[in-house]
Image: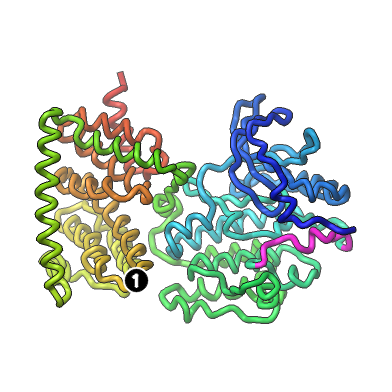
């Protein structure tokens, strides 16, 4: 039977926004894939938001495929595990076949990597661990995902990792000769296992291979195989060995590199033989002392649905912050102060520009950088290593419990910026990476100042974070939250209230420490 071109058919599928299908009202389209569209919908009977996935009409023309689709999705709906996006219902309404599943606020792993680059080894190991836990439950139930890739791995604001699209998985206890044409092509060429490419029988080791490719991308920033066509990619999966992680990332723990390399083995017999075996190996990896997921999750505070701000929304947020900063100043003085400040900044900018134009040698070492170096804080090879060193040093007890440890912790966090200033970066990508880790170090530094009640120092750090670009929204929110705490403790309650009003919709972006500080203020304001 001749099948229609999925691309052509996909363009003919209308937008179903505002449609009511059974118990569900479709609110807006979240995304479009090769096989289905996904909508945010409201389930009327339970008054909850769900993800509503509709099968493309060209696939719905094949009755055998629709039957298989419903049968396999129902089997996947029986999977009940914290790291698996829960399927609520599989059905058909007005000729539209659909899957209703848990709606996850957050972003997928691909979006996270596009925004932040490669993952810190600690984060990568925890992503691998949680995905593997999901695959283990699926394998125990005879379900194979067959399309593990960054787009199908969701990262939630609470730090949980959830695997989605189990509704299109394959059930292993079915007749293996029943693999349809759609089943053969299911998967994404960048992440497909060799046996998947060749149309051979698949089992849980196929998902392990795809997770290995995904893990390689998490740690390197690109997949191990790249080509201009899907066919060329497929051939590489079958015949070409992936690059050695130990050569590309010698800074990574060797056991982590070897684990990912084994996951990507060409022959299934050479991989981990089950998700359970892989999970045991992952748990043996020690990437950083004194680390647990609760601590790690604070670096995964995500943008959720706030990541797609329009230009007008960004402008409104900018005006809100400007009015907040000037909020408690009389209007007549706001205008004069603004003109005065702009004049000073203009003069300073001209002077700085002339100085930079005539200065051929690199900027001199700042006094604070010399102070840090003289204090015995070692310089690491990269900005990521410097942050990791500071994190480890502070985690070993130098967390501000004494004047000496507090001073050393302060220098440790400051060393990230002083040793790796963005202006010395050799490329734009490196500038972005340095800025990211400097922001993270400043966040930790601000928390240190709050614990020590050093309000002026904390004000300086959090004011800097609050003024970052809106593309770095989480740090902007952290900065505003820190300013709220500072203003409150300095007795400027009006400014503190304004800050609280600004961050209220984004409280889920804050870590536990900052949430506790904000909740203490809220209790004081509204406790009675």
Residue at 59% over, 78% down: 242
- Can the viewer see residue 406? yes
Vertical order, 244 against 83 (above or below): below
Q: Nearer the viewer, residue 11 or 37?
A: 11
Label 1 environment density (alpha carbons within 10 Å; few <14, some 14–19, many ≥20): few
Q: Nearer the viewer, residue 110 or 159?
A: 110
Q: What segment carries the magenta color?
A: 177-189
Per the image, is 175 magenta? no
| Quarter holding residue 361 | bottom left
Q: Is residue 337 left or right of residue 123?
A: left
Residue placed under numbered mark 1 in the picture: 427
Q: Residue furthest top?
A: 528
Callout 1: SS: loop
Look at the image and tell me in which quarter the N terminus lies. bottom right
Residue at 86% over, 62% down: 176
Residue 336: x %, y % from top left: 10, 36
Q: Is residue 374 left or right of residue 397?
A: left
Residue at 70% over, 61% down: 187
- Can the viewer see residue 140? no
Count of marks placed on residues: 1
Q: Is residue 216 left or right of residue 395?
A: right
Residue at 45% over, 62% down: 119
| Quarter holding residue 434 | bottom left
| Quarter holding residue 480 | top left
């Amino acid at each position: 039977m001749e099948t229609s071109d999925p691309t052509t058919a996909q363009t003919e599928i209308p937008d179903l926004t505002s449609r009511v299908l059974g118990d569900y009202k479709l609110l807006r389209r979240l995304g479009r894939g090769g096989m289905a569209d996904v909508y945010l919908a409201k389930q009327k009977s339970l008054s909850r938001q769900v993800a509503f996935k509709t099968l493309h009409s060209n696939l719905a023309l094949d009755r055998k495929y629709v039957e298989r689709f419903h049968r396999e999705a129902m089997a996947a709906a029986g999977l009940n595990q914290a790291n698996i996006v829960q399927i609520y219902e599989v059905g058909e309404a007005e000729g539209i076949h659909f899957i209703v599943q848990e709606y996850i606020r957050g972003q997928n792993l691909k979006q996270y990597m596009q925004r932040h680059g490669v993952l810190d080894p600690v984060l990568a190991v925890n992503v691998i661990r949680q995905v593997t836990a999901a695959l283990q439950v699926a394998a125990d139930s005879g379900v194979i995902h067959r399309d593990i890739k960054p787009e199908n791995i969701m990262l939630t604001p609470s730090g949980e990792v959830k695997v989605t699209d189990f509704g299109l998985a394959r059930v292993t206890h079915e007749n293996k000769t029943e693999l349809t044409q759609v089943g053969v092509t299911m998967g994404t060429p960048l992440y497909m296992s060799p046996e998947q490419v060749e149309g051979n029988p698949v089992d849980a080791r196929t998902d392990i291979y795809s997770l290995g490719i995904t893990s390689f991308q998490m740690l390197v920033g690109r997949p191990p195989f790249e080509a201009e066509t899907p066919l060329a990619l497929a051939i590489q999966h079958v015949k070409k060995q992936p690059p050695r992680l130990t050569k590309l990332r010698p800074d990574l723990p060797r056991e982590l590199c070897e684990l990912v390399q084994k996951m990507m083995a060409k022959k299934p017999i050479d991989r981990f033989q089950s998700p359970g075996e892989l999970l045991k190996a992952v748990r043996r990896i020690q990437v950083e002392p004194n680390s647990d997921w609760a601590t790690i999750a604070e670096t995964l505070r995500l943008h959720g649905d706030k990541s797609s701000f329009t230009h007008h929304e960004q402008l409104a947020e900018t005006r809100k912050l400007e009015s907040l900063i000037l909020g408690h100043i009389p209007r007549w003085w706001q205008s004069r102060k603004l003109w005065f400040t702009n004049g000073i900044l203009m003069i300073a900018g001209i002077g700085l520009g002339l100085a930079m134009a005539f200065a051929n040698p690199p900027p001199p070492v700042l006094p604070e950088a010399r102070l840090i170096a003289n204090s015995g804080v070692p310089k690491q090879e990269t900005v990521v290593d410097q942050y990791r060193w500071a994190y480890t040093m502070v985690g070993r007890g130098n967390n501000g419990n004494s004047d000496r440890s507090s001073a050393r912790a302060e220098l440790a966090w400051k060393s990230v910026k002083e040793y790796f200033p963005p202006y010395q970066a050799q490329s734009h990508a490196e500038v972005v990476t340095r800025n990211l880790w400097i922001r993270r170090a400043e966040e930790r530094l601000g928390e240190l100042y709050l614990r020590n009640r050093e309000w002026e120092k904390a004000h300086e750090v959090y004011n800097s974070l609050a003024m970052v670009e809106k593309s770095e929204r989480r740090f902007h929110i952290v900065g505003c939250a820190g300013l709220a705490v500072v203003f409150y403790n300095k007795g400027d309650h009006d400014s503190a209230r304004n800050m609280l009003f600004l961050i209220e919709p984004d409280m889920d972006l804050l870590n536990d420490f900052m949430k506790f500080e904000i909740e203490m203020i809220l209790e004081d304001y509204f406790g009675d």
